Structures are given as structure tokens and as C-alpha cells.
Image (spheres, rainbow, N blue to C red):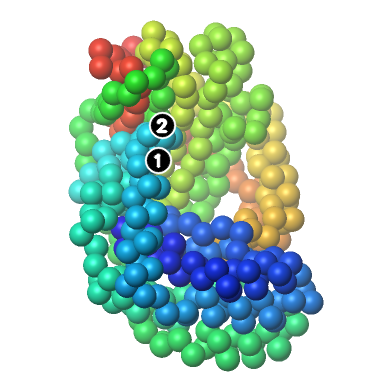
């Protein structure tokens, strides 16, 4: 939980936030992910030097013990809200089960909440010093700032941080599980919130893009033509909402399908989802459908070239994980190079139900969903 309280406190100076916003931009978001803390900010080009100086000040501003205690109270309120949010509950159930014994299993709101009363200001100060240092920080800039003046501002500001050390990120093997795993938490709801997830080891670039195309074909939230939307909602009328998504970590990945349904529809939906994944793994999809899904993903990558937040987040993540960055202009071309066999190979990797974890929240006490396909 120290990284989360750090994220909150580092950008909490109201005077500097006021100053940045007066420059026509400022902080747009801050988030604590499984493996890093990120701050997103922007300024009009004519104010980028002033804005960068202001952001550097807020990043390095002193934090008192009193401010630490107040933010602890705020975090307690945030965690109380998260403990009632079905999406957060599902994510926590899934990751603590699928990555049990792995360091990612700690990316769970419940232990953060339990540990909050025991965090000390001394722990926080030591953690901040270790994390907020030159070698452990990446600044991704998207746009057209005046390069030399911008570099001079960085040298005058962030360049004064202690050099420190790059915190090592280690590889851990995926936990071994035998058999289909169901994890449930009862909640006073009328419908069941479900997450069917498939943990995967670290993927190669072609495998990762193959997984993205598989996700696009099966259940991308933005595609009304996706297989799961057509089959589960449009044909069978079993849900209002269903989607698939992909998440990538330093040493592993996951493919997930999420839906909300009446309790009596749960088992049917589970088996339809597994049936569709299994069909791709066994028989593939037609070249026409594959090329269409690949083209749609490539066009989405083109669209992302107009999204500074998407580009900056991806570049920072690449630098943190690999020590180098790709050229965003090549993202669409890399997708177009993916072969149908790459997608099928990933589908085969997730088609074994023994690897799957089904997380359930809601009126689930008497539900024991079975795999029938």
C-alpha cells in the first residue's frame, strides 16, 4: 500500500496544482498499477517550460507527517468504496487466486486496506526516497516542445534528484494449478458479476499481438460484431454486457472475459465462452475473418497515434520493462505482420479449462457452475 499513498501525496499540493491548471493544463490523472505509479500531465506548447517546472516542484515538494495522516484517512474512504465495487472485487478475486504465491498476487485492494492502519510516516519517507530517484523514473514526452530549453529545465529540476538505483523487477514462474478453479464472494445483488481469466506466461511480441487479435475477434468491447457479443447477447439473449480484454505484466499476461447475468444463465454462458475459444483453438478462423480482425486492430493502432496519453503510457512502460522503446509509427505495421498461426497458437494456450479461473460476485452461494463442453 505504500506505493498507493505515495501516488496520492506526491501530487497533493493545492497551490502548485492551481498554478499548473492556470497554465492551461496540469495533472489529468495519477494511478497505481501492479508494477508502477504513473502521473499524466499536459500543457499547451507555449507554457510547457513553466508547466514542467511546476510539475517538478510538486513531485519533489516536502510532505509532512500531518499530511500523511490525512491522506491515510482519504485512502480508507477510497478502499471502503472499492470494497463495494463489483469490478474491483472481481479483479481482486481473480488476481489473488490466479497469481497465488506470485508477487502479483499482492496487487489486491484487500491487503492494502488491511495494512493501511499499520503504515508509518517513516516507512513512507524511506520508500519515497528509494522510488523517486533518477534511475527509477521515466519521463515520456509526446508532442513538440522546444527541445534544448526543455532539456535545460529538466536538468535544473528533475536533474537535481538523487541518482539512486533502478529497482529490479524479477521474473517469477506462474503458479501451477490443477483443474478449473472457481472463486466466489457473496454480495447482495440481483445479478452475478463474472470474470473468466486465463493466466499466461510472458509472451513474445508476435504472440502478444496474436492475443490482441484474438481478443478483437472474440469480445472487444468496442465491436458490436465480436463473436461473444453476437452469440451470447444477440443470439441467445443471456446478457446485456459481455466483453473480453487483455492485460500484460512484466513476466506474464492474462486474457479475461467479463459479463453480468442472472444466476440461472451463468453455466450456459461459461460453456458458450469456452466453446468459442475451443473452436478457434481447434479449427482456427477463416483467413477472411482473421484478416478483417487484424485490419481492425491495425486501424485502432493508427488511431492511437492521435492519443498522447496512450503513446506516453506505452513508451514509459516499454522503457521500464525493457530499457528501450519502440516507434509508435510502426505499431500498425507490426500488427499487419501477425500471422493466423500466431493467433491460433495463443488460443490453444488458453483453451485448456484447467488453466482457467472463474471469479464470481453477487448471489453466488448456491452456484456450482460446471464445464460441459
Q: Which residue is mark 2?
A: 86
Give the mark nearer the N terminus: 2 vs 1. Answer: 1
Camera sees residue 301: yes
What residue lies at 38% left-to-right and 68% top-to-bottom? 67
Viewer-nearest residue: 26 or 212: 26
Percent x, y of residue 63: 40, 75
- Which SS class for mark 2? helix
Residue wearing tag 1: 81
Report if the CB atoms under discs 2 and 1 are less than 8 Å apart.
no
Residue 91's disc number:
none
Would residue 357 be found to the left or right of residue 27 on screen? Answer: left
Q: Position of residue 35 (x, y in %)?
A: 39, 59
Q: Quadrant of the C terminus?
A: top left
Q: Residue at x 49, y 90 (%)?
A: 160
User: Is residue 237 placed above or below 312 in the rendered structure?
Assistant: above
Residue 342 or 59: which is nearer the viewer? 59
- Residue at mark 2 to residue at mark 1: CA–CA distance: 10 Å
Q: Nearer the viewer, residue 147 or 352?
A: 147
The N terminus is located in which quarter? bottom left
Residue 253: x and y in percent read: 41, 47
Residue at image coords 57%, 90%: 155
Residue 51 is drawn in which quadrant? bottom right
Q: Residue 114: where, in percent of width, then height?
A: 23, 49
* Residue at x-position 33% and y-position 29%: 359
Whether residue 275 is visible here, answered yes or no, is no
Task: Please indicate whether residue 281 sits to the left or right of residue 144 in the image.
Answer: left
Amino acid at each position: 500500500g505504500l506505493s498507493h499513498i505515495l501516488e496520492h501525496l506526491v501530487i497533493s499540493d493545492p497551490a502548485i496544482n492551481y498554478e499548473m491548471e492556470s497554465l492551461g493544463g496540469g495533472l489529468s490523472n495519477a494511478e497505481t498499477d501492479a508494477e508502477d505509479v504513473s502521473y499524466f500531465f499536459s500543457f499547451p506548447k507555449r507554457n510547457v517550460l513553466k508547466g514542467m517546472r511546476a510539475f517538478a516542484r510538486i513531485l519533489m515538494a516536502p510532505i509532512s507527517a500531518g499530511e500523511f495522516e490525512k491522506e491515510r484517512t482519504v485512502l480508507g474512504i477510497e478502499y471502503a468504496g472499492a470494497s463495494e465495487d463489483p469490478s474491483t472485487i472481481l479483479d481482486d478475486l481473480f488476481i489473488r487466486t490466479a497469481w497465488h504465491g506470485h508477487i502479483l498476487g499482492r496487487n489486491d485492494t484487500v491487503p492494502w486496506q488491511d495494512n493501511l492502519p499499520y503504515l508509518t510516516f517513516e516507512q513512507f519517507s524511506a520508500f519515497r526516497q528509494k522510488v523517486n530517484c533518477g534511475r527509477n523514473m521515466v519521463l515520456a514526452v509526446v508532442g513538440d516542445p522546444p527541445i534544448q530549453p526543455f532539456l535545460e529545465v529538466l536538468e535544473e529540476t528533475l536533474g537535481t534528484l538523487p541518482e539512486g538505483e533502478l529497482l529490479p523487477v524479477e521474473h517469477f514462474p506462474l503458479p501451477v494449478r490443477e483443474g478449473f478453479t472457481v472463486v466466489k464472494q457473496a454480495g447482495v445483488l440481483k445479478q452475478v458479476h463474472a470474470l473468466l481469466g486465463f493466466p499466461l506466461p510472458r509472451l513474445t511480441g508476435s504472440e502478444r499481438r496474436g492475443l490482441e487479435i484474438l481478443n478483437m475477434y472474440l469480445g472487444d468491447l468496442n465491436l458490436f460484431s465480436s463473436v461473444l457479443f453476437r452469440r451470447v447477447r444477440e443470439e441467445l439473449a443471456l446478457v446485456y454486457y459481455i466483453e473480453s480484454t487483455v492485460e500484460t505484466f512484466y513476466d506474464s499476461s492474462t486474457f479475461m472475459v467479463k459479463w453480468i447475468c442472472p444466476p440461472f444463465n451463468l453455466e450456459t454462458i461459461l460453456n458458450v465462452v469456452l466453446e468459442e475459444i475451443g473452436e478457434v483453438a481447434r479449427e482456427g478462423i477463416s483467413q477472411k475473418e482473421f484478416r478483417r480482425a487484424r485490419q481492425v486492430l491495425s486501424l485502432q493502432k493508427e488511431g492511437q497515434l492521435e492519443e498522447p496519453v496512450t503513446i506516453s503510457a506505452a513508451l514509459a512502460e516499454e522503457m521500464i520493462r525493457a530499457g528501450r522503446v519502440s516507434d509508435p509509427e510502426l505499431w500498425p505495421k507490426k500488427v499487419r505482420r501477425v500471422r493466423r498461426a500466431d493467433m491460433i497458437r495463443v488460443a490453444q494456450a488458453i483453451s485448456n479449462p484447467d488453466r482457467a479461473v472463474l471469479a464470481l460476485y453477487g448471489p453466488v452461494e448456491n452456484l456450482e457452475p460446471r464445464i460441459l463442453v
